[in-house]
Amino acid sequence: MKILNNGQLTILDIDKKVTLYGFVANKRKMGKLIFVDLRDRWGITQLVIKNKIKNFSKESILKVVGKVKERKDKNPNLKTGEIEIIVENIEILSFAKQLPFIIQDELEAKEDTRMHHRYLDLRRPIITNKIVIRHKFNKAIRYFLDNLDFLEIETPSLSKPTPEGARDFLVLTRKKDHFFALPQSPQIYKQLLMCSGFEKYFQIAKVFRDEDSRKDRQPEFTQLDLEMSYANEEDVQKIIEKMFKFVFKKLNKEIKIPFKRINYLEAIEKYGVDSPDIRFECFLYEVTKMFRNSSFNLFKNSSSVKFIHCYEILTKKQILQLKEVAMKNGSKNLIWGFIDNNYEGPAYKFFKNEMKLIEKKFNLNKGTFLFIGDNYKLTTKSLGAIRIKLNEFFNWTKNKNDELVWILNWPLFEYDENLKKYIPSHHPFTSPTKDSIKDFDLNKNKAKARAYDIVMNGYEIGSGSVRISNLEIQKRMFEAIGLNKQEYNQKFGFFLESFNYGFPPHAGIALGIDRIVMLLTNSKSIREVIAFPKNPNGIAVMEKSPTKIIEKN
Ligand code: ASP
């Protein structure tokens, strides 16, 4: 068995005889000597090979026996930089052929090439380290929750559909036309665990949603799923805040608690999105009324006109990029204006008078103005996306501390334009607020939820709620989202039955571990922090799956 690793020997080990194993990260010939950097996941140790020269390539695997000596040229950047091993015996345990890419942190290889050989990609220290941080993160969570008497309980992966708003992955069975669904979340099971009397549950759970992949989305991902009986929204929020504080500390990071709290409507109004990055300002300003009597018809006739402003002067190319962002978010009406030394741009051509009033009202006499006039949803959504793009241009968040924020006071439902009906903003197990209980099924556009989301640096990293624990309310909720009695009994009858036998009030949350680790490790996508991820098209490029079903007769 391997006893020593390549990141541990120091000046205190001088003259010890040691055995080391690892990959040949680097090899340099200097006269009659060969210097090798021997790498494993703990670090690098320098080997000096004198007489025992054998032919081996980079990334081959060596076993060496030798003596620890003090180095003449020390390397302060390396944990083992003060010593080297004078090799006495060398064994090549495995030869490596020419690799498809070099194993180093900075790399030009395409992502698909790296994913084809993900096991090589994982050897790169920068990636290895992300997986190590993920392990430490999960371990700290488990430690923290165990100390508070939470139990980790596994729930099934072969299951019935769970409504979280995505498509289900289905698993064929040997029984003709019968299938399981993979869980979009353990939601129903964790609630049933409350009914079972476990009171404090958590699970680091794999969940599955068949939806388009993005940099922060994968078809299978990992949640910290948590549920507590006799708890309300503040109880859950406080535990999560303390957990973050603890885990951050374990990772040598600081975070201030309590986190900020922002109402859902305020988030949309000010930041344009329900997952705001609050590390920078650049808010949305409301100016609909100022255009009511305007001669600029486009805005005069828009139900919502807003703008954002930044002190930087944008280039024409940047403006074009922002127009694309607006288009992607459904709005064609981006109008811009500059104040530098001069006044410039369509805003000063189309509505100069309004611009003068706006400059005065908001005390802004320099910089770039970006307006959108559309309906409220499109105006806020487009400007929200533009705000994020502006930060990409100017990097206002560079060197800023992480910011976590709770988004509260959610609507219970949202109107789905494609389905032409109301769907739950979260899921149909979320309790309406006290005020909404009496008529949430009649006034769906007004109903409020006892739900909360948690957002880190502009990414939604979790959501939760106080749950419905009353049978009649749960049935009304299913009806409100368009399920008739027969349908809800067929889908959720087993769950509804449990309400008859004593069901404690309960609340919970689920946090996206991949996203949090992505942010903690400054990664560009969650793919970097998952050992074997799918590519952006949802395909496992190394294994080449999914594959076609071949019918056997
Ligand atoms: N099941 C929810 C989700 O996966 C989280 C929760 O309400 O606990 O988003």
Image: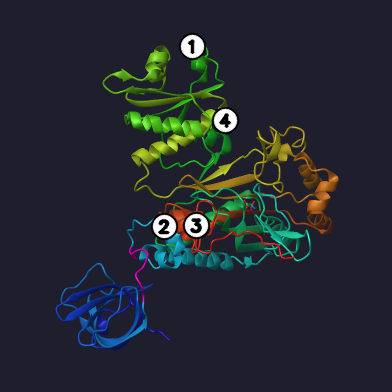
Mark sitting on residue 521? 2
- The quarter of the image holding the N terminus is bottom left
The residue under label 4 is: 377
Alpha carbon distance from label 3 to label 1 = 50 Å
* Magenta-colored span: 96-104
- Judge the density around disc 1: few (<14), some (14-19), many (≥20) Cα neighbours within 10 Å: some
Alpha carbon distance from label 2 to label 1 = 49 Å
Alpha carbon distance from label 3 to label 2 = 15 Å
Alpha carbon distance from label 3 to label 4 = 33 Å
The secondary structure that dominates the magenta segment is loop
Pointer 3 or 1: first along the chain = 3
Instruction: Please indicate, yes or no, whether residue 365 appears anywhere in the rendered image.
Output: no
- Above/below status of 108 relative to 433: below
Mark sitting on residue 294? 1
The residue under label 3 is: 244
**SS label for mark 4:** helix
Alpha carbon distance from label 2 to label 4 = 33 Å
Residue shown at 46% from the left, 60% from the top: 529
- The quarter of the image holding the C terminus is bottom right
Pointer 3 or 2: first along the chain = 3
Give the amino acid type for the residue marked by disc 3 in the picture.
Answer: Phe
Give the amino acid type for the residue marked by disc 1 in the picture.
Answer: Ser
Q: How many marks?
A: 4
**SS label for mark 3:** helix
- Judge the density around disc 4: few (<14), some (14-19), many (≥20) Cα neighbours within 10 Å: some
Give the amino acid type for the residue marked by disc 2 in the picture.
Answer: Thr
Instruction: Please indicate, yes or no, whether residue 227 appears anywhere in the rendered image.
Output: yes
